[in-house]
Image (cartoon, grey):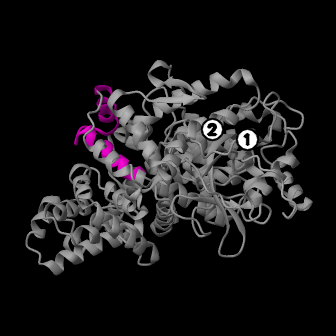
Amino acid sequence: MTEIQGEIQRVCETLGVVAERLEQARPFAKYRHQKPVLEVVTRMLAMPGGLDAVYQAAPGLDAAGLFHGSDWDHPDILLPQIVGRTLESDDRMIVGLEAASLLRLLAIASGRATHPNIHADHARHFLTQVLALNLRSFFAANSEADRASAGDGHLRARLLRFIADHIGLRDVLGVLVAEIWRILEQRPIQIGPVKEMITEIAIALNRQGSEPGSERLGAERLVNALFGPTTGCLDDPGIEAYLERLTHMDDAGLLREATGFARAMHDTGLVSDYHAGFLRFAAEHQDALLVPEALGLGQTGQDCWRHYRELVLELIEMAVTVETPQSVHGLALLLERGVLHYLPIAPALSGQMRLRLHDAVRERLRLAYGGTITPEARLLAGVLDVLGQPLGVGQGANPTCQSARAIAVWGLNDPDFLLHLIAQAGEFDTILMHFEGQPINSADLPAGLAAGAPIDADPVSVLLVPHLDRVYAEMGRLCAPRGGDPHRWINPEFHGWWVARECLVAVDVATGNLADFDGFITRFYESYHPRFNGARPVIHPQPAGVAVTDANARFVGWHAIAILRAATDQTGQMRVYFYNPNNDSGQDWGGGVTVSTSGNGERHGEASLPFEQFASRLYLFHDDPVPPRQDITAVPEHLIAEVATMARQSWAAERGSQPVTLVGAS
């Protein structure tokens, strides 16, 4: 027996002793014996061969009560997206607990162990998600952060590689590729994280390879969309070399390149740096055919191109760069939406191109995005993105869902007002809005929830959100003495005239308890369900508030969304389609309520739920105070009861008797 094997054997014997004490302890005393077990486990994890030893011991440690009293005692509710952060914790005991839990799940997935709350397929799926979300840790070269943590033996990377050896790369690629496509279906403006994941896939494929199959094909399709979408750049030659190639192509070759770029862009929502370079090349050569072809324009877009050709060429020159390739997608969708035919937009965009930014604004944009291009170009590219795909606006890692919702809805419904605000904030670093005739200047107000510039957000949000957040908070202060939910007055003044003037709230603001909840549900059906409102459509997006719940249907918080439409999906089921400012709208709200973002009639950027499920999480909505019509079908009592039951089994579980403090979020 080698010295290393002998050391492992001795530590395993010690583990057996402390684990036996843990197993024999009564439930209320187990916490006293968990720490000694974890201390031995963390020691083993850092030793050569220690991972396999803990893997062998993990099911027994679980049965002994290692996870008793913690979230890890319920593996069926664990979230794969937080595993990576937990493994980076400064608390070695927490790291050891997470590692032991993962190795326990690996034993279950491998058939070596069973658990009453999770079966092998679920455990395997969980682990593949963990690997997919931490791909860099075990395929890419170690980072400086990894090297700096050498004291823990690179536990995270070694642990994930150990799991990958048992799970296999093919499953990991399948999960990751599916996750990327799910995100891209929503067409977010901020796709930096997606690009990073695709880059890691490219590295993994190059270093590790994979088995042939749909997973590999799906992965290569994403990689090619970024690094080689056309024949001319399939070998990823670099921008300069590619632009040189273009000068030697004939007309047919250039047209094939343009078509290939457009197809890849509209297929994936991704824009290659080569695409931006090609579009600039086509614009510089004033090619009337290549520009619309490279943008993939349909009939409406072609019409806008013909009428506003000089403006479009100027926008390309100033906003489309290899540093801002996604602006190509924004410009294409802006033209496809026909926004330029709205009279104020063309002069407003011309003014935007000549805008002199305030020094503080320039510095804020530089801090957010670096100085590779001018802040003016960065902001203009962001304007194209928001006007082209307004439902792609996300709040990022910021508690500012109201401001993100406002930007998105203005981009969709009131783009000239949005450009007006951008011009104000850009030139003067302030915005002026009004609340019931009273002017509110954001420069005179203290910071709101967004104390500084938002992070992980698009340039328009970086510019506007700090100001919008202050204005929103000030409107709340002005109407606070009135009592009731302040959004009754804030939402129409903040968003625009088209917000319905009546505001229905499911809870009593003073106590947080439900208030005439059956009446609230009934009114929502009568307001938005085509069967019960005389087939009256949603004409303008309406702000609303939902009570967000987790995968166990437990209340998380209030959240601002916008109702876009109510319609039947391809199966005939009535659904509510809505805008969610979260960067990812696909969420499991528990109790069988899983938000869909594609496959159920959603347009890019929309989320949806069956009408009953949406109503069960709704707590605030707007409607016009119209007199009831006698010819409208009454809402059946069983529908009201069904929605009320779903609500009371989730966010409203304790709102009949226990006061809850409300935090405005709608």
Left or right: 57 in relation to 6:
right
What amino acid type is highlighted by mark number 1? Cys
**Residue on which the image places disc 1:** 503
Q: How many numbered marks, from 0 up?
A: 2
Query: Which residue lies at the image location 76% right of the left edge and 30% below the top edge?
Result: 484
Query: Which residue lies at the image location 50% right of the left edge and 32% below the top edge?
Result: 468
Residue 450, percent from left and from top: 50, 30
Residue 165, percent from left and from top: 47, 62
Q: 173 or 462, which lies in front?
A: 462
**Label 2 element class:** helix
Query: Which residue lies at the image location 17% right of the left edge and 68% below the top edge?
Result: 287
Residue 177, percent from left and from top: 46, 65
**Label 1 element class:** strand
Q: 230 or 579, which lies in front?
A: 579
Name the chief secondary structure element in magenta. Answer: helix
How far separated are the C-alphas under marks 2 and 1?
Answer: 9 Å
Reply yes or no: does residue 563 show up in magenta.
Answer: no
Quadrant placement of the C terminus: top right
Q: 63 or 213, which lies in front?
A: 213
Residue 491's disc is: 2
**CB within 8 Å, label 2 to label 1:** yes
Residue 475, percent from left and from top: 60, 27
Q: Quadrant of residue 612?
A: bottom right
Left or right: 491 in relation to 168:
right
First along the sequence among labels 2 and 1: 2
Left or right: 640 in relation to 309:
right
Q: Quadrant of residue 18?
A: top right
- From this viewpoint, is residue 272 visible? yes
Answer above or below: position of 343 versus 569: above
What amino acid type is highlighted by mark number 2? Asn
Instruction: Please give the range of residues in magenta.
Output: 359-386
Query: Which residue lies at the image location 32% right of the left edge and 42% below the top edge?
Result: 379
